[in-house]
Amino acid sequence: MTKQEENGIYGLMAEFDDPSAAVAAAKLTYGAGYRRINAYSPYPVEELMDAIGFHRNYVSLVVFAGGILGALGGLALQIWTSALDYPLNVGGRPLISLPAFIPITFECTILLAAFGAFFGNIIMNRLPQPYHPVFNVPSFSRASIDRFFLCVKADDPKFNYGETRAFLEGLGAKEVTDVES
């Protein structure tokens, strides 16, 4: 535990008026060696995500896995029920009729992919999150309206309270605020 964490500091937060200033500040912050940084904006800013070094996004992988599991599960259920559990040969048709299984397989694929997208998003975003230290910053309520925020966490190896505050103020931030834990 660092000295700042012991004093109840979660980190320092800089406030910006427009996305281009926030992106430029995030690039400079990442370039200066800070790695434990978060950015908050009222709408998605793709460049901001890249600027803070966030490259992990597993939602598409979870959706793909859910779709594959849904397709295999739907197909397996139909094969098991029509050919193994209760085989009923009507009119000499095959017990495993793949063309007849396509609609149900497709629907199961979509269903489990949608569940994967929903629950994967909820879990990966750690929701619901009724409390986070950044909620202690009074001006943070504008993060969902018209402000952009960049937070350097106190557990960053390069974090030094005085130096980090001076660095963030030098980036042209409208305001630099302590984030209490």
Image: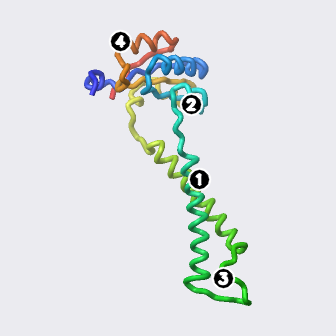
Q: Are the residues at dot 2 and dot 1 in contact (C-beta closer than 8 Å)?
A: no
- The residue singled out by tag 3 in the image is 95
The residue that label 4 is drawn on is 162
Comparing labels 4 and 1, the label whose residue is closer to the camera: 1
Q: Nearer the viewer, residue 168 or 77?
A: 77
Q: Earlier in the sequence, mark 3 or mark 1?
A: 1
Residue tagged by mark 1? Answer: 64
Judge depth for marks 3 and 2 and give the one in front.
3
Q: Is residue 70 left or right of residue 131?
A: right
Tag 2 residue: 42
Q: Secondary structure at mark 3?
A: loop
What is the C-alpha distance between the residues marked 4 and 1?
46 Å
Q: Position of residue 97 (x, y in %)?
A: 69, 77
Q: Quadrant of the N terminus?
A: top left
Amino acid type at mark 4: Gly
Image x and y of residue 126, in percent = 44, 43
Image depth: mark 2 or mark 1 in front: 1
Q: In terms of sequence position, does the residue under pointer 2 or pointer 1 come before the other? A: 2
Q: Position of residue 113 (x, y in %)?
A: 59, 56
In this view, the residue in front, 150 or 135, is 150
- Secondary structure, mark 4, is helix
Tag 2 secondary structure: loop
Q: Which mark is residue 171?
A: none
Picture colour scheme: rainbow
Q: CA distance from mark 3 to mark 2?
A: 55 Å
Q: Amino acid at mark 1?
A: Phe
CA distance for labels 3 and 1: 29 Å
Task: Name above or below for residue 85 compared with residue 150.
Answer: below
Residue at (47, 44) in percent of width and height: 124
